[in-house]
Image: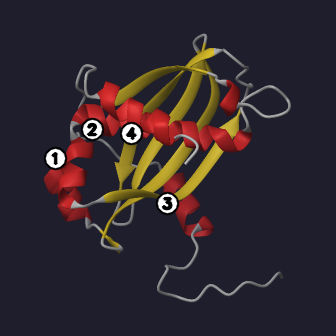
């Protein structure tokens, strides 16, 4: 909710920026705002994922995919995320969020996103997303019909499969009892 207005503004302005292919990459220039930082005066670690949402929305809006998804009643949801930090983004610092799809499988669409300032990577994340409609996953076949076929050679790195396998929780229709080992 804290980025709702920025997201709405981004969806409005992204449609006026040059179009992209969903299989291309988005570069979204931003500045660190006071609402992005924590008591240490740098971007809060949890805020990186929220800001990266903006990068994915920029790619979807500029490629026309967001409009297609909304027409079909599809909503994106994060299924898994991992991030590594290298440097801290400071208050008022300019940076870009670089976003691209690195592949998809039967369960998810995988994004790589980077926070870049002064030509250097400050943080890098991998996000597994699902598209859902009426509480059910959208099939890969439906996604490819709307998105188009990915470019030849777009293949997920092997470690992504291992990461998803070892970090996945049971599906929402199965039990996932809580207890500490």
Q: Is residue 87 left or right of residue 13?
A: right
Crowding around mark 4 (Cα neighbors within 10 Å: few <14, some 14 to 19, many 20+) is: many
Who is closer to the viewer here, 171 or 39? 39
Which mark lies nearer to you, 3 or 4?
A: 4
Quarter location, residue 15: top left
> Which residue is depicted at the point 32% across and 43% down?
154
Residue with the mark numbered 4 = 57
Residue under numbered circle 2: 22
Mark 1 → mark 3, Cα distance in angstroms: 23 Å
Q: Position of residue 80 (x, y in %)?
A: 54, 58
Q: How far across and how far down the image is residue 29, in percent?
A: 48, 19
Q: Which residue is mark 3?
A: 161
Nearer-N-terminus badge (2/1): 2
Q: Residue at x 44, y 44 (%)?
A: 111
Nearer to us in this view, 36 or 176: 36
Q: Which residue sits at x=64%, y=22%?
A: 32
Task: Report how far apart the C-alphas of labels 3 and 4 lie in the structure.
Answer: 24 Å
Q: Secondary structure at mark 2?
A: loop
User: In terms of image quadrants, where is residue 46?
Assistant: top right
* Circles 1 and 3: CB atoms closer than 8 Å: no
Q: Which residue is mark 1?
A: 148
Residue 150 appears anywhere in the view? no
Q: Position of residue 132 (x, y in %)?
A: 34, 65
Q: Give SS at disc 4.
A: helix
């Amino acid at each position: 909710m804290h980025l709702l207005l920025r997201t709405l503004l981004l969806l409005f302005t992204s449609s006026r920026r040059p179009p992209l292919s969903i299989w291309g990459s988005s570069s979204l220039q931003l500045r660190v705002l006071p609402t992005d930082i924590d008591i240490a005066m740098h971007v809060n670690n949890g805020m990186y994922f929220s800001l990266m949402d903006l990068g994915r929305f920029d790619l979807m809006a500029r490629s026309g995919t967001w409009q297609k998804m909304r027409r079909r009643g599809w909503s994106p949801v994060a299924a898994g995320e991992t991030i590594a930090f290298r440097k801290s983004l400071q208050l008022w610092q300019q940076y870009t969020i670089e976003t691209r799809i690195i592949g998809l499988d039967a369960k998810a669409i995988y994004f790589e996103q980077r926070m870049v300032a002064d030509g250097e990577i400050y943080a890098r994340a991998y996000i597994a997303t699902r598209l859902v409609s009426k509480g059910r996953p959208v099939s890969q076949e439906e996604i490819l019909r709307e998105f188009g076929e990915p470019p030849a050679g777009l293949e997920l790195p092997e470690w992504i499969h291992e990461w998803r396998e070892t970090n996945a929780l049971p599906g929402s229709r199965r039990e996932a009892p809580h207890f500490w080992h």
